[in-house]
Image (cartoon, rainbow, N blue to C red):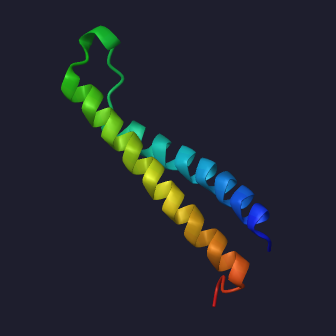
Amino acid sequence: MDDQTQQRLETLFTLGIGFGLSQLVTNRFIEDLVPEQRGIKDDIFRALLRAGTTATSTVLASVIVRRVARGHWGS
């Protein structure tokens, strides 16, 4: 698998994993408050959760694509 294909797959996996993780995290940890009712702590918490889900999804996507490219998936 060439580098360009790996990068495209990694991007697609990152988007998919990120969407799934953000839905789980948002539904579990973040209350949908009206913006006027949120404080700075709520905004910081929301930003940290988003950063964490983005980092996690990027790492997972990279690992998955690397394993698929090497043919080690499932072995």
The quarter holding residue 63 reads bottom right
| Apparent side of residue 45 relative to residue 61 in the rendered image (left or right) | left
Quick check: 1 above or below 22?
A: below
| Apparent side of residue 73 relative to residue 25 in the rendered image (left or right) | right
Q: Position of residue 4 (x, y in %)?
A: 77, 61
Q: Nearer the viewer, residue 55 or 35?
A: 55
Quick check: 19 above or below 44?
A: below
| Residue at x 63%, y 91% (from the top left corner) | 75
Quick check: 10 above or below 19?
A: below
Q: How many marks?
A: 0
Q: Position of residue 71 (x, y in %)?
A: 72, 85
| Residue at x 25%, y 12% (from the top left corner) | 37
- Image quarter hosting the N terminus: bottom right
The quarter holding residue 55 reads bottom left
Q: Position of residue 33 (x, y in %)?
A: 32, 18
Q: Nearer the viewer, residue 24 or 68?
A: 68
The quarter holding residue 43 reads top left
| Residue at x 47%, y 43% (from the top left corner) | 22
Q: Position of residue 56 (x, y in %)?
A: 45, 57
| Apparent side of residue 45 relative to residue 3 in the rendered image (left or right) | left
What residue occupies the far front of the structure in this picture?
3
What residue occupies the far bottom of the structure in this picture?
75
